[in-house]
């Protein structure tokens, strides 16, 4: 801005040269383009970031973080476990086979395997934390396949929230919903 105030250039545009391949420099004289300062700033920032962050470096870092610090949360796990009521009589047999198929498909992921992820390559799931949750109204965790149960050894039963618990959540947490609504 001191450059602009100094009188050397009075219009609110920045002129810089472009080589045509997306790389710009004040030293190259291939093609001059005039941009509003706001747009020129965005272009220059993008070009500088490309020097430091490549897409492959970001993808490699994402894979490394997923493999070492990844957490997968599988909700409604109770939907793939056949209840004792569903496994006998009626049309429950087909449903039971389908549910076991889903469990068998999930089992290698939880045990640890290499999974191919589009645009990122292979991710090893050996050190990824898998958390499964479900209400288990019509079934119980023991209705899961034994192999699946063995890979999820820790079980925690949660008690329902009370009215006081709900009030604490809505008012006492740092970024609670009530304060957010008031600020909006």
Image (cartoon, helix red, strand yellow):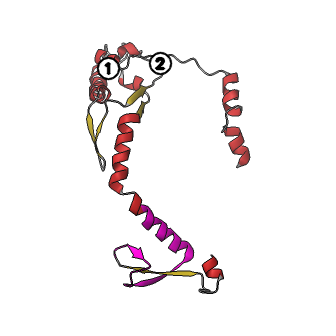
Please state the horizontal and vertical placement of residue 144, each as a whole percent of the image.
Answer: 34, 18
Q: Earlier in the sequence, mark 1 or mark 2?
A: 2
SS at circle 2 = loop
Q: Quadrant of the N terminus?
A: bottom right
Residue at mark 1 to residue at mark 2: CA–CA distance: 19 Å
Mark 2 surroundings: few (<14), some (14-19) or many (≥20) residues within 10 A: few
Residue at 26% of width from left, 23% of height from top? 97
**Nearer-the-camera pick, 172 or 53:** 53
Mark 1 element type: helix
Taking the image as shown, residue 118 lies to the left or right of residue 71, namely left
Disc ID at residue 137: 2
Q: Name the residue under label 1.
A: 148
Residue appearing at x 66%, y 24% in the figure: 165
* Nearer to us in this view, 21 or 180: 21
Instruction: Determine if residue 70 is in view.
Output: no
- Above or below, comparing residue 70 to residue 164 in the picture: below
Image marks 1 and 2: residues in contact by CB distance under 8 Å: no
Residue at image x 47%, y 70%?
44
Check residue 181 in the rendering and tell me which mark sits there, or answer none. none
Q: In this view, does 22 lie above or below 120?
A: below
Closer to us: mark 1 or mark 2?
A: 1
Q: Quadrant of residue 129?
A: top left
- The range drawn in magenta is 21-49
Question: Whole-percent x and y of residue 159?
Answer: 57, 17
Based on the displayed image, in which of its 4 quarters is residue 122 positioned? top left
Q: How many marks?
A: 2
Image point 42% across, 26% down: which residue? 132
């Amino acid at each position: 801005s001191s450059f602009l105030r100094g009188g050397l250039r009075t219009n609110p545009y920045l002129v810089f040269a472009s080589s045509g391949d997306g790389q710009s420099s004040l030293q190259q004289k291939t093609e001059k383009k005039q941009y509003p300062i706001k747009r020129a700033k965005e272009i220059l920032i993008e070009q500088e970031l490309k020097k430091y962050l490549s897409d492959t470096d970001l993808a490699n870092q994402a894979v490394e973080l997923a493999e070492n610090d990844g957490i997968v949360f599988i909700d409604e796990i109770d939907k793939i476990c056949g209840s004792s009521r569903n496994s006998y009589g009626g049309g429950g047999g087909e449903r039971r086979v389908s549910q076991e198929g889903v469990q068998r498909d999930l089992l290698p992921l939880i045990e640890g395997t290499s999974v191919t992820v589009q645009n990122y390559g292979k991710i090893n799931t050996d050190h990824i934390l898998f958390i499964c949750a479900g209400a288990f109204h019509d079934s119980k965790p023991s209705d899961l396949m034994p192999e699946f149960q063995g890979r999820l050894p820790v079980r925690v039963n949660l008690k329902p929230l009370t009215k006081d618990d709900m009030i604490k959540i809505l008012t006492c947490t740092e970024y609670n919903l009530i304060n957010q609504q008031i600020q909006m």
